[in-house]
Each structure stands twice: as C-alpha cells, then as structure tokens.
Image (cartoon, rainbow, N blue to C red):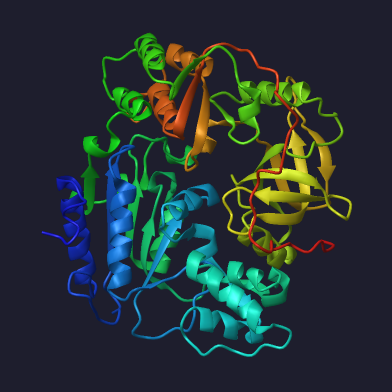
C-alpha cells in the first residue's frame, strides 16, 4: 500500500508501486526517503500509458512529489546549481513549450526536452544570486542591485521556482546574466517525459544517453510521429516495463468531451454514427458545440484543427481577409507557428539562444509588431515562462493554389514562421487549449478514403487527438463557413513576467 493510495485508483497504485520498485533498484527509495549515490550500469526504462482521463498526469505529479520529499533535486532547464557526486536529480520534460506549460499550470515544474539538452552559462557574479535562490549559498551583495531587488527575486522564486524569472523580477535582462548556451556534457539521473507518444527513435536514444533512469508517460491512441510508420517508442519496450492506466470515472464523470473521445475505441463505430453522437451530446451539454461555421474570434488564440494542408491554407487566408490584413504585412495579434531556425553552423550560439527562449519547431507565438531593425519581429511565445522575444524572422504565408508562399517579413536568417490560425492535427499534438474547433469535413474525407494507421481507421485517430486538445469546450465544425470577427485582433490579454526577458536585436 503506497502513501498515496487514497488518491490513486487500483491501476495507478499498481503503476506507482512498480515505478517505486524500479527507483529503489537504482538507489532511490521514495517510501523510506533513502537515497544512495548513483552507480554506473544501473539503468532502467519504463512507460506509463493511458488514454485521456486515465490519470497519467496525476500519477506523474504524485511521483514528483514523493521524489522531492525524499530529497531528490529537481533540475530545470534554467539553472542546475553545484554538482555533487552523491546527489540524485529529477527532470520533468515535455516535447513542446505548450505541453510543458500545461504541466506547470498543474504544479509540476516541467521544462522542454530542448532546454535540458542545452543549458545556460551564467555570468559568475549573477551565478551567486542563483546559488542563493536555490539554497546553496548566502545572500550575495551585487553591485547595482538593492536589497529590495533581491527581495523581489526571492519572492518570485519562492512562488515560481524559475531562476531567470526571479532575476528578471530583480530588474535584470537575460543578456545581463546569461552569457551563452552549451550542449550538456554530463549525464543526468532520472527523467520523466510527458507526451511520450510524440518522441521519435532519435529523440528517445538521445534521452537514454542523458538519463540512466527514464519513465515515459504517453497516450497509445494518439498519432505516432510522422517518420515512425505508426509505431511509438514505448511499443518496443518489454511488457513488464509497460503499465497501462484506464479511465478514472470518478474523476472524469460528466465530461462529454472525454466521453466522445473514448467512444472512438468502439470498432463498430462509423463516422456518421459518431457525428450523430456529437450532435446529440451538443443538445444536452454546452461544452460540446455542433457548429455550422468556424468562429474566427477563437482562431487568434486556438487554431482550427484540420487534416489536410489545403484546408489549413484556405482557412488561414480567410482569417486574414476577414480581419482586413494587408498582403504585404502582418497585423498586431496575428498567430504564428515556429517552423524552425534557419541559421548556418557558424551562428550556433544564436540558434541556441533563440531555441532556449522558446522558439523551437511547433511553438505557438503571437506577432506583436516589427522590431527596431529590418527583418526583426516582436513576439509573444505562448506557454514560455519569459514570453516576450524580439528576433530576426522569416514569416511565410502560404496561398491557395500557389507553390511558393508569400513572405511579408524576411531577415537574412533567423526564426521561420508559418501562420497559426489553423494547424494540422499532427502538429497540434502536445498542445491543449480551452476552446478547440475541429474541422469535421476533413475527417469525413479521411473516413471516406478508408485509410488505416496502426490497425485503426485514420479518421478515428485524428478525431481522438483533435478532441482531446480541448480542455473546456469542443466545437465540431460541420460547414465550410467562417464567422465575421466581433472586433479587431488584440494583444492586451497576453500576460508576461514582471520584467520580460528581451532577446537583443543583434545583427546576424
């Protein structure tokens, strides 16, 4: 019987006990609070799998809490503190900023996989503040920082556990205390990875090189990475290392969105039957909406989810047209999706700087306006702890029936962006929004084509992933129509850290 038995279901408790035993075998006893130094050769990998609503996040949070109470140091991508040979560490990771922010909102100190692989190098003077905040030193005296500024930093760190955020609260910018970025040259200890279904084989192998003990949390009903041919990395693990969770009805009772998602597991269910189910649910519960058109007001913060690229491009251009966006410029408040960094190897430091600030492939950002130099854009990175960034940008807006995209802004090199008013369901994995619009005509096309992926009709996998992106309300859009906006695009609803970290507008 675990100390958390009162909060866990039977299958969660079984998984908790199995993970506890695995940790005990590598020298971390969370029940007795006994830690022994890590030893070479002690390696372990396990997976906790379950569909939406099965309690994966609750179990992850309980394990994190137990490890923290046992004295394991939680490592983030912000700052690691002094290394000790005998210390045991835990890092909680997610593939995207959005997925990491979902965990952080639930009290789990998660960071992205990228931020663990690449770590910041601190100025030695300001490293003293970081050590003090982390409990590894006395309060320092820093020239130019008052006692009140250090108190603000301490108060921020106590609440948010973020070293850069705390230093920003003291009035510092990232360029003041971070002198560069380096690839991790020493391995870590224990790694928990959320959204494990998004990992490909290369990422999995990279993580196994960093962590001797690895636990993946994932949903087997989601879409596998595009280059994985329908397989997920935890499929290859031995059965004894895989722990399956089932839906916890007492926690997710009266949740019509999850009811619809789980109904898709019925092998007899056809597309038209499922649509009838959605329509009937919408009549009884306003958390599901049978929508005759796409609500353009929602697209600025949560993209319409589609299957086909042609649909995505048409919806994006319709969104821009109804907002009166000019052909040669972006409007303040338009949503974008980072499509990667285009920089040569000689600018590796700049690439790391951009990626560390959240501009990794798939990141959702809001355009705030042009920067002070040509080709630069001011951006708000959704889900990032320090979201305000100014960076050299290449913005591509794809046009219907045109092979080449229109580029309203283009630096010589930098972060590349696609428009984010609509995204494919594949790209939406790992993200979650309060309100989600699913473009049902695309799923009907997938159903009519009869495609199968990993033994299941593709339309069901697409529908499952799309539906489970919604945390509050699901809009099932059945017509190819677009509503008119109720007002102009806005940015005043975007929250920022007390003193935002700004990426300096340097020449590339």
Residue 126 visible, this angle: yes
- Say left or right for 156 vs 16: right
Q: Residue furthest left?
A: 1
Tell me: residue 380, above or below residue 262: below
Q: Name the quadrant of the C terminus.
A: bottom right
Indicate the position of residue 332 as horizontal and vertical percent values: 78, 40
Residue occupying the point 34% across, 76% down: 88
Indicate the position of residue 133 as horizontal and vertical percent values: 52, 79
Indicate the position of residue 330 as horizontal and vertical percent values: 80, 37
Residue 122 visible, this angle: no
- Say left or right for 3 vs 286: left
Q: Name the quadrant of the N terminus.
A: bottom left
Residue occupying the point 23% across, 35% down: 249
Tell me: residue 67, above or below residue 221: below
Indicate the position of residue 131 as horizontal and vertical percent values: 52, 83
Residue occupying the point 65% across, 24% down: 296
Q: Nearer the viewer, residue 503 or 65?
A: 65
- Say left or right for 415 vs 29: right
């Amino acid at each position: 019987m675990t100390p958390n038995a009162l909060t866990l279901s039977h299958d969660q408790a079984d998984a908790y006990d199995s993970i506890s035993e695995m940790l005990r075998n590598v020298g971390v006893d969370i029940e007795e609070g006994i830690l022994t130094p890590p030893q070479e050769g002690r390696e372990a990998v396990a997976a906790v799998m379950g569909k939406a609503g099965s309690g994966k996040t609750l179990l992850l949070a309980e394990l994190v809490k137990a490890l923290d109470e046992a004295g394991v140091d939680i490592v983030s991508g912000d700052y690691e503190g002094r290394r000790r040979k005998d210390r045991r560490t835990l890092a909680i990771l997610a593939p995207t900023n959005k997925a990491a922010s979902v965990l952080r909102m639930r009290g789990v100190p998660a960071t992205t996989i990228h931020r663990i692989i690449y770590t910041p190098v601190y100025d030695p003077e300001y490293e003293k503040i970081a050590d003090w905040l982390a409990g590894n030193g006395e309060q320092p005296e820093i020239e130019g920082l008052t006692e009140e500024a250090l108190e603000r930093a301490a108060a921020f760190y106590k609440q948010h556990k973020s070293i850069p955020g705390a230093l920003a609260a003291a009035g510092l910018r990232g360029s003041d205390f971070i002198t560069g970025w380096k690839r991790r040259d020493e391995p870590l200890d224990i790694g928990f990875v959320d959204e494990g279904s998004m990992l490909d084989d290369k990422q999995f192998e990279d993580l196994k090189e960093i962590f001797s003990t690895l636990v993946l949390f994932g949903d087997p009903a989601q879409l596998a990475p595009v280059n994985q041919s329908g397989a997920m990395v935890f499929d290859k693990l031995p059965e004894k290392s895989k722990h399956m969770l089932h839906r916890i009805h007492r926690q997710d009772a009266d949740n019509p969105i999850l009811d619809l998602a789980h109904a898709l597991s019925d092998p007899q269910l056809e597309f038209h039957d499922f649509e009838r189910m959605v329509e009937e649910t919408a009549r009884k519960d306003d958390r599901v909406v049978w929508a005759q058109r796409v609500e353009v007001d929602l697209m600025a913060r949560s993209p319409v989810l589609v299957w086909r690229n042609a649909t995505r491009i048409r919806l994006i251009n319709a969104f821009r047209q109804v907002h009166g966006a000019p052909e040669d410029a972006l409007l303040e408040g338009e949503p974008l999706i980072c499509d990667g960094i285009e920089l040569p190897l000689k600018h590796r430091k700049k690439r790391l700087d951009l990626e560390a600030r959240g501009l990794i492939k798939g990141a959702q950002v809001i355009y705030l306006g042009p920067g002070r130099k040509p080709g630069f854009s001011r951006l708000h990175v959704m889900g990032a702890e320090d979201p305000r960034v100014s960076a050299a940008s290449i913005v591509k807006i794809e046009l219907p029936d045109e092979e080449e995209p229109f580029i309203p802004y283009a630096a010589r090199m930098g972060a590349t962006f696609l428009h984010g008013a609509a995204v494919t369901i594949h790209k939406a994995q790992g993200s979650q929004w309060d309100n989600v619009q699913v473009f049902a005509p695309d799923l009907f096309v997938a159903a009519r084509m009869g495609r199968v992926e990993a033994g299941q009709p593709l339309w069901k996998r697409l529908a499952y992933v799309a539906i489970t992106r919604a945390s509050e309300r699901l809009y099932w859009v059945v017509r190819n129509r677009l509503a008119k906006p109720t007002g102009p695009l806005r940015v005043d609803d975007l929250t920022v850290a007390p003193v935002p970290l700004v990426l300096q507008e340097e020449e590339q």
